[in-house]
Image: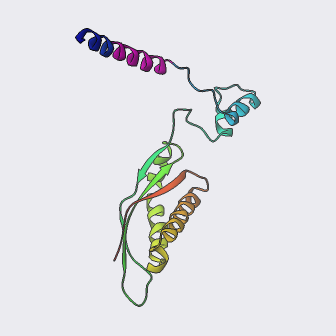
Amino acid sequence: MKMIIIGLVVGLGLGGGAFFFMKSQQPAPVADAPRAAALEGSEEGPNEEGAADALGEGDGPQDEGGIYELEPFIVNLADTAKVRYLKITIKLDLVRSKHSEDLNKRLPQIRDTLLLLLSSKEFAAIRTVEGKMELRDEILQRVNAIFRSNKVKMAYFTDFVTQ
């Protein structure tokens, strides 16, 4: 009886190990259609910058962007009946990781634009989920407007406190 149990455990262990080994040996997925079409249309070939720029990819296939964290904002809200505050921390999801250098260069403009936007909001407009989503879209638009291109693909709130 012991030999059967030991044999089953060893057999299952070997079978599981073989399964994971085989899964790790699968070929890489085929390139997606837009990338393949852009590469075929390029006369320079697949390694040229022209094809990458046509796809919006200048840093190669490995560059998946990155997260840029802004310092927290503390602003007075535009409510006139009662003094209200907003403390918010925003993280920006970049299209390419190299854009973090551009954001560093324009940080005073970004903070100024966002301070003006945040302080123009009333509590009633940002207390709902829809209001927060609208604010996130406005932040995204304003930051990308500074660069006149889409360097930021999403804004995330990691801290959102009103009082």
Q: Is residue 43 left or right of residue 125?
A: right
Residue 157 spot, x, y in % from top left: 42, 60
Whether residue 100 is visible: yes
Residue 7 spot, x, y in % from top left: 30, 10
Q: Quadrant of residue 30?
A: top right
Q: Main secondary structure of the magenta part?
A: helix
Whether residue 16 is in magenta: the answer is yes
Q: Is residue 114 left or right of residue 41?
A: left
Q: Quadrant of the N terminus?
A: top left
Above or below, comparing residue 85 to residue 50 in the picture: below
Q: Which residues are magenta?
A: 11-25
Q: Quadrant of residue 18?
A: top left
Above or below, comparing residue 143 to residue 48 in the picture: below
Whether residue 100 is in magenta: the answer is no
Q: Nearer the viewer, residue 10 or 127?
A: 10
Identify the residue shown where x is 63% and y is 42%: 56
Identify the residue shown where x is 43% and y is 85%: 79
Give the residue at the far left of this rendering. 2
Q: Nearer the viewer, residue 19 or 3?
A: 3
Identify the residue shown where x is 48% and y is 68%: 129
Residue 109 spot, x, y in % from top left: 48, 63
Identify the residue shown where x is 56% and y is 57%: 144
Give the residue at the far top of this rendering. 3
Above or below, comparing residue 60 to residue 4 in the picture: below
Residue 141 spot, x, y in % from top left: 57, 62
Whether residue 50 is visible: no
